[in-house]
Image (cartoon, rainbow, N blue to C red):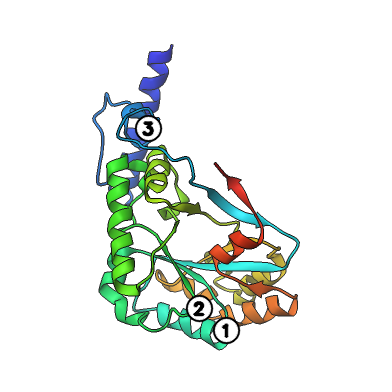
Amino acid sequence: MRIERRAFLRGALIAAGGAAVGAGAMAAPRLFPPNHLPFGGGYAPAADRPEFEVHGQVRTVWYVETDEPIVAFTFDDGPGPNWTSTVLDALDAYQVPATFFMVGQHLAAYADLVKGRLGRHEVGNHSWSHPDLAMLDEAGVAEQIGRAHDTIRRYTGREPRLLRPPYGHLGGSTLLAADRHGYDLVLWSRQMHESAYLHNEAGQVSEIVNGVSPGQIVLAHDVGAAERLVAIKHLGEMFAGLRQRGFRFVTVSELLALGRPKGISP
């Protein structure tokens, strides 16, 4: 029965991967043979091999527990030529700090867009090329994190300590690589739903202004499809509305220091 169950799980994973590629998704850079089980160091390894020096300090955080009306806005996938400058303009106009989870190859290509504009903001790691890290082995994840880390340090002068895995997908290999690099993993507890408000942009503003609660991490994007403008064009209204409710804006690291992180802690 155990062998049959493992064979079923392998078949389901391979079928799902094939369906994703067929739908136009990015293929994972590292794929495993049909008879491979991940327990020896693949995408979901146990930390039982000598090369895995586990420190056990990595945290995975969705929000913090606090009564103080504070919120952290985060922007993923940039920088990019379409919307990053617009987002930075809105943040400047309302003096709001934010955390940008940058893709390394995008930063390498568009570093001039953020040069001199990151003063109050925080920069986090969002991988080098935005693959699904949950489908990579530890070596593949470490390469993605390390290359993006070096690029962020080179172009911004910052030493990132926060990692947001693309799509929010977590595998054991991601946890091991984050632990090795001394990263905390940051997910989110509220996000923009632009596609739901294409014909009611005020609805997206209302959802954020009225829905945010103390200690939340808000997910937005500063690159992508045109529908992202449903949120990006109205960031100022969101900031003004939340301020009217008494909220203060902080970076993710400031949020973690001010409240009790809720997620998976060592």
The residue positioned 33% from the left and 40% from the top of the image is 17
The answer to which of 96 and 212 lies nearer the viewer is 96
Q: Of the numbered discs in the image, which one, if any, rests on residue 68? A: none
* Disc 2: which residue: 120
Which of the two labelled residues, at mark 3 and mark 2, occupies the earlier sequence position? 3
Q: CA distance from mark 2 to mark 1?
A: 9 Å
* Disc 1: which residue: 95
The answer to which of 149 and 216 lies nearer the viewer is 149
The answer to which of 254 and 218 lies nearer the viewer is 254
The residue positioned 49% from the left and 76% from the top of the image is 229
Q: Can see residue 223?
A: yes
Where is 187 relative to 154, above or below?
Answer: above
User: In the image, what residue type sits under mark 3?
Assistant: Pro
Residue 136: % across, % down: 32, 42
The residue positioned 32% from the left and 34% from the top of the image is 42
Locate residue 257 relative to residue 171 in the image: left or right: right
* Disc 3: which residue: 45
Q: CA distance from mark 3 to mark 1?
A: 43 Å
User: In the image, what residue type sits under mark 1?
Assistant: Gln
Q: In the structure shown, which secondary structural element does the residue marked by tag 2 occupy?
A: loop
Q: Are marks 3 and 2 in contact (CB under 8 Å)?
A: no
Q: In the structure shown, which secondary structural element does the residue marked by tag 1 occupy?
A: loop
Q: Are marks 2 and 1 in contact (CB under 8 Å)?
A: yes
Furthest toward the bottom, the residue is 93
